[in-house]
Image (cartoon, rainbow, N blue to C red):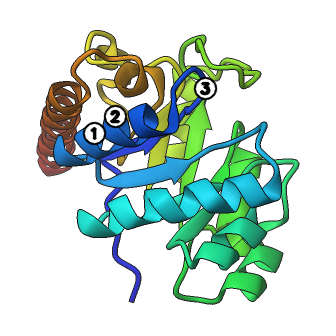
Amino acid sequence: MKTFDTSLYLITDSSGFYEDEFLAITEAALLGGVTLLQLREKEKTTREYIYLARKVHELSRKYNVPLIIDDRADVAYAVNAEGVHLGQSDMPVDIARKMLGENKIIGATAKTVLQATEAYKLGADYLGVGAIYPTTTKVKTVLTPTKTLDDICKAVPIPVNAIGGLNADNLQILNGIGVSGICVVSAIMKSDTPKQTAEKLLRKIREMRCEHYENSADNSRK
């Protein structure tokens, strides 16, 4: 049985850091309460990706947090990571499922309701939807309206996470939308205090979710 919590989903960015610095930031974030960890490496060779993934997996296991590998089902398989995240141009979800097995977590990127429902039907366990705000990472982003995010949350029964430029000061844009959590990169990776930043983000997203569920319950009783 797969159990995972997408409340605070950290997507790493090792660019500009020495390996020991990168691992220290990642561990601090895990100490701060990150609930799901994705290793994202766009520039590394397959061998370099596997090498770093093994080191990050040691950390994530220490804190009992699932490790998700971005894009590369082969790397996820090689290091026995808990899952993989697939974009629209990556391996299809159903093929990755056959490769990795039923017990692995498979996430997918969706920018439309059609993409979301297709990913769900193919067996995705959660969705990442965005970008909500412009990002400072090297990954090319196309902004997603919050209305689309809300529609996706209502269209599929699996966790939906908002991604893209989110931080502790702008989460109010998600008020009233039934997201399961947020995905962040720079908010933690570029923070001078990654542990404290993770703690603050986790507290805010959980407060926001509780408020949403309370409001939904009140509306259903009316």
Distance (Cα) linking label 2 and label 1: 6 Å
Residue receiving disc 1: 29
Residue 64 visible in this rendered orientation of the protein: no
Q: Is residue 65 toward the left or the right of residue 15 in the image?
A: left
Q: Identify which residue is drawn at 70% across, 71% down.
A: 121
Q: Is label 2 in contact with label 1 (beta carbons under 8 Å)?
A: yes
182 above or below 165? below
The disc label shown at residue 25, or none: 2
- Secondary structure beneath dot 3 equals loop
Q: Which one is in front, 193 or 155?
A: 193
Residue receiving disc 3: 15
Q: Which residue type carries mark 3?
A: Ser
Q: Which residue type carries mark 1?
A: Ala
Indicate the position of residue 6 as horizontal and vertical percent values: 37, 53
How crowded is the residue under tag 3: few (<14 C-alpha within 10 Å), some, or many (20+)? some
Q: Identify which residue is drawn at 59% across, 14% down.
A: 135
Indicate the position of residue 57 as horizontal and vertical percent values: 45, 64
Marked residue nearer the N-terminal end (3 or 1): 3
How crowded is the residue under tag 1: few (<14 C-alpha within 10 Å), some, or many (20+)? many
Q: Which residue type carries mark 2?
A: Ile
